Structure formats: C-alpha cells, structure tokens
Image (tube, rainbow, N blue to C red):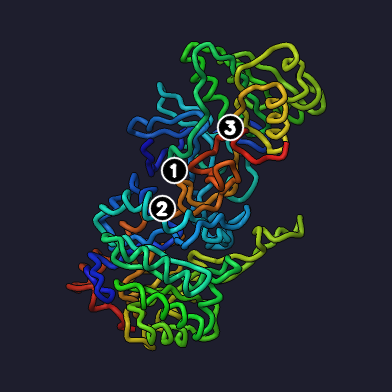
Amino acid sequence: MKKFLLDLSVKSVEQIHQRYVLIKLTDEKPLPKMLPGQFVEVRVDGSPATFLRRPISINYVDEAQNELWLLVATVGEGTRKMASLKAGDVMNCVLPLGNGFTPAKNGEKVLLIGGGVGVAPLLYMGAQMQQSGLEPTFLLGARTAGDLLMLEEFKRYGRVYVTTEDGSAGEKGFVTHHSLLQQETFDRISCCGPTPMMKAVARLAREKGIACEVSLENLMACGVGACLCCVEKTTEGNLCVCKDGPVFNIEQLLWQI
Amino acid sequence: MNVKIGALALKNPVMTASGTFGYGLEFADFMPLDGIGGIIVKGTTLKPREGNDYPRMAETPSGMLNCVGLQNKGVDYFCEHIYPQIKDIDTNMIVNVSGSSPEDYAECAARIDALDKIPAIELNISCPNVKDGGMAFGVTCAGAASVVKAVRARYHKTLIVKLSPNVTDIREIAKAVEGEGADSVSLINTLMGMAIDIERRKPLLSINTGGLSGPAVKPVALRMVWQVAKAVKIPVVGLGGICTAEDAIAFMMAGATAIEIGTANFLDPAVSIKVRDGIHEWLENHKISSVQEIIGIV
C-alpha cells in the first residue's frame, strides 16, 4: 500500500475520559485508503523532549466526512501535547503504516477483543465488517465502568459485551473470564490491548483452537521497517512490528503461553 | 552541486546514513530516491545476524539511543535478494559492511566488489552495539589499520571508512586508515550512551548501552569533522544529527565533501530531498556557483 506524508488538519479534539482524547483529522483531498489495524506516525513538534514520531493506531475512518479518528491515551509528554491541539491546527502524519488485521471472510464469526486504549483499532475493524455484511461481536474490558471507551460507537456495528475488573459494568473480571466464551463459538479472534491481556487471550484461543491475531505496540522509531528497533521474535526470526506487524497471528509469535 | 569522493561521483553531496534508510525502498513512497547523491544501505555482515534483544531504542533529549546490533540476513542474501531490487536506482547505492575479524570484513567486501552497480562500500569499524568486532577495531589505530588493510587487498572500488567518535583522538584513527588506502572517511558513528528507567531501576536498552544519534550529537560531530578534515588528505563525509540544509552547510564548511542524513529520516521521511533543495537555494542566495567553494572554508 502506498504510504503518504501529510499535513492533516485537526477538526476536533474531544476529551472523552480523564486519560483519553479523540482527535478527528481531515484534509482538503480525500484521505488515502487505510485498513483496520494499521497505524499513523504522528510528528509531535520535534522539540527536544518529544523528538521522535508517535505511533497511534487508526481508530476509525469516516469516508463520508473525510475524517481520520485517533484515540490517544495521554501517557507522556508527546501524547499530552497532541491532546492540547486545537481545531485548525496541523498534525503531520505518515500513513497508513503496518499490515492491519486479516479481513473477515464471508460467513466467518469474528470476536473482537479489546482492553484499555487497545479498543481503538477494533472500531474501524467492526465498521468494515458491518459494511461487508458481517456482524462483529465486541468483547471489551476495562478497570471500571468509567474506563470503557466509545461504547455507543461500538454498539452501532455489532453486539457488545463488557467486563470490568471491579464489576461496575458488565461481568466482573477479565475479558477471558466472560461467559460469552463458554456460550458461543467463534472462528476467529482479533485482539488488541495490554500485553498480559493479549497473552491470556492467545492462551484461550489456542486451547479452543480459534485462529487469533494480536496487535503489538513495541517501541519504534522509523515506522517503515528501516531502523529495526521494534523487532519481535517470531517463527521467521526477528520481524518489525511497524512493517511486518503490528498484527501477528499468535502462531507466528514465540510467546510462552 | 556535484562532488567527488575518490573516484565516486555524486550528483549532490546528500546521502542517507546506514541503518536509518533501510535499502532505500522503504522510503520510495515519500521521495525520489534518485534525487540524492547516495544511499548507504543497512550494515551487512558475512553471516546473518539476529541482532540484540528488544528493547533496542530509547528516546533521549534531541536524539535517540539504539542497540540494534547489526541485524541483517548476511551478504549472500543481500547479493541474491536485495541487490536485484536496488541495482537500478539511479544513484550511488553504497553498502555498509561490518564484521568480527579482518578476514570477515575482507570476504564480505570481496563479494560486494563483484556487484556491478555497487560503486562503493562504507566500512563500519565503529558499531558500539556488538560484542565481537565492530567498534573494537575502530578505537585503536592498529585495529582500524588491520581491517582496512585486509579489505583494501580484496576490494577495488571506492572505500569509505566510518569512524567511531568513542576515541581519544579521532584524527589518529583517520590517519591510520588513510595510510592503509582508504579513499574517504565518514564520521561520526553513534556516541556510546545510556538511559535508565528510575522506577524499574533498570537500563532502557536490552544490552544496557547503545549508540546516541540525532541533533544531540551534532556539535561533537561537527568538531570531529573539522579536526579530521584538517588532518587527512582524503575527502571526509560528515554526519551526526544533520536535519536541515543549514546543518549540512555547516558540516561542509567544516570540511565535509559530502554529508549523510541519519536519524532525521525518522522525523521526516523526505528530509534528504529537502536538505538537497535547501543547500541549492542557499548557494543561489549567496551567489555561489559551486558547492565546492564552501568545503572546508572554516
């Protein structure tokens, strides 16, 4: 897929949670084609403390509005600066990067599992599935009810099941404990979230013999497979999360699960 | 804008540094690869190398540390699979060569010598991230000379030797490699550094230390280029934190015949073309007809 270096225009920055903002970007020209699971390398400001680009996954692409949505967790200096952008500001982006999730096939029953800010790419994945006539099932986990992100958006595209660690919404516990997993069978799982969660999901998928893809977020610099900083050990040797991933089939990874 | 490094003619003095620009192909969507004077491709060794464990990078003020450790699939893979993809790019495609013994370096160089469309190599005697070889050769005059001598005997095209800044007097190393027949020296490779996560009480890099690059090292690099350019007769290629045309011009004024852009490729994948255009514009604004006129004027 052709990659672009674009100065996108900030349409809005919405604080949707104490720690998360939803940034909507647009451009005069139609945005390039992007796939669910791909990401954007965002130039913050090049200043000493926020020198390198920040990889941010594609949350949603609204083709009708010509919008690209980024769900950003404000975890450090760079993401805090991104959150302070205002409508009309410019965000310099390299996109689309990485491989993306394998698209669901006709008749395939797919479960999309997300945790924390890892739910971000699953929205666009679910939307694309709905567009191809499939009904995605979302299983989303968070610490508390207040930490569940964009629930109303997810509900537009499929069935949504929820777990919280404190039981304040949905079932209490981790996503892998949800009763849905006992009640229904799935052909494929697409997963994004904290590494311990993805490993637990990978273990479950392997036990049940379900094909499973996970999206990794190793520290990276270039975003295009040049610097070899973000490598993950795989059955094919060290692969770049930025170029060969970020989505990997769990059977490719050398995770001890 | 054209310059020469030994027998190697460059259409302009801008090249991209090894390890920051892949094989060029990764950047083809962002800029015309044939628009710059040269592309120095990823470090290549005789045998495949897996490189170091993750994490391999850490962002530091105005720069970054890396400890990639020369991950590459080996020279034979390069010759069979990569070379056919890059040989028709209309610029100088230069291979960065590394090794763990003078014989290793020489054998790897000899195999690349056989490739028609690779007009030069850059010998990496300055990688701080590998235990065997790498910087070990680049920090003593005898070590540097031994590698260059072995390679020179088997490599017949333009030989650039990339120097380490992690030495007491870089001029002595430069003179030693010049004495063994290097056509040019490039400097600087990364400065050895470290970063610590104080909450985890652990280094941020898997092998504790790594090489520092980016604007943070630029004044050090500029000083060393200036010193070396005055100490040797062979052309000097300058690199270390160059992000803009102004940076590039400063390196050339310090004595660099050509320059390499490294970490800045991560900030802006089209930066090298912008630097090329910026140098051209600056020369025009100052009514200077040839870039040669500014080389070494400081």
Residue B257: percent from left, percent from top: 30, 75
Residue B277 seen in the current view: no
Looking at the rendered image, the disc whose residue lies closer to the viewer, 1 or 3, is 3
Rendered residue at 33%/47% (across/down): B28
Q: Which residue is mark 2?
A: B268
Q: The numbered mark 1 sits on a residue in which chain? A: A
- Tags 1 and 3 touching, CB below 8 Å: no
Q: In the picture, residue A19 is in which quadrant?
A: top right
Helix, strand or loop for disc 2: loop
Residue under label 1, please give it. A93
Please name the amino acid that badge 1 sits on.
Cys
Residue B266 image point, x, y percent: 45, 54
Q: Report, in whole angstroms, how far the alpha carbon at label 1 lies from the one at label 2.
A: 10 Å
Q: Is residue B90 left or right of residue B151?
A: left
Residue picked out by circle 3: A249
The amino acid at mark 3 is Asn
- Identified at 63% across, 36% down, the residue is A20
| Pointer 1 and pointer 3 on the same chain | yes
Q: Chain of mark 2?
A: B
Question: Can residue B298 be seen in this snapshot?
Answer: yes
Upstream in sequence: badge 1 or badge 3: 1
Of the pair A109 and B292, the residue shown nearer to us: A109
